[in-house]
Amino acid sequence: MKGGWPINVLNALKNVPEVTRIFAATANPIQAVIIETGQGRGLLGVVDGYKPVGIETEEKIRERRGFLRRIGYKLR
């Protein structure tokens, strides 16, 4: 999959009988943790994105929610 885009291989992965579910919803770069043993290979998990850069303050929460309301994304 080197150099590939997830959208290019997603249907092929879904059609593999051993693949039960695929979950990925992120705008961050991800890395797959894969292991190989005598029995074969397996996916242990996915590393998603970066460490948080900080904690959202009450002021930032109000700012974010206000923005979402202004663009019509959040109604309450």
Image: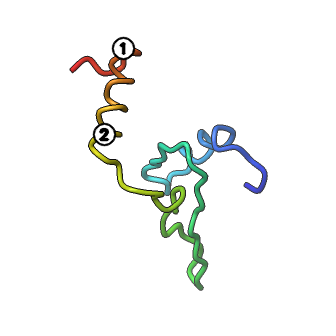
Looking at the rendered structure, the kind of residue marked 1 is Gly
Which residue is the extreme one toward the left?
A: 76
Relative to 74, residue 24 above or below: below
Q: Position of residue 58 (x, y in %)?
A: 27, 43
Q: Position of residue 2 (x, y in %)?
A: 77, 56
Q: Please tell me which residue is depicted at 56% across the width and 69% down the height of the picture.
A: 33
Q: Nearer the viewer, residue 72 or 39?
A: 72
Q: Position of residue 61 (x, y in %)?
A: 31, 38
Which residue is the extreme one toward the front?
A: 59
Q: Please tell me which residue is depicted at 39% across the width and 24% down the height of the picture.
A: 67
Q: Please tell me which residue is depicted at 56% across the width and 48% down the height of the picture.
A: 28
- Which structural element holds mark 2? helix
Relative to 30, residue 44 above or below: below
Residue contact at pointers 1 and 2, CB within 8 angstroms:
no
Q: Give the residue at mark 2.
A: 59
Looking at the rendered structure, the kind of residue marked 2 is Glu
Q: Nearer the viewer, residue 21 or 62?
A: 62
CA neighbours of label 1 inside 10 A, class few (<14), some (14 to 19), many (20+): few
What's the mark number on residue 72? 1
CA neighbours of label 2 inside 10 A, class few (<14), some (14 to 19), many (20+): few
Task: State left or right for residue 29 relative to residue 26.
Answer: right
Q: Nearest to the eye among marks 1 and 2: give it.
A: 2
Relative to 63, residue 43 above or below: below
Task: State left or right for residue 21 relative to residue 34.
Answer: left
- Which structural element holds mark 1? loop
Question: How far is disc 1 from disc 2 in space, using C-alphas?
Answer: 20 Å
Q: Earlier in the sequence, mark 1 or mark 2?
A: 2
In the rendered image, the quadrant that contains the C terminus is: top left
In the rendered image, the quadrant that contains the N terminus is: bottom right
Q: Nearer the viewer, residue 17 or 59?
A: 59
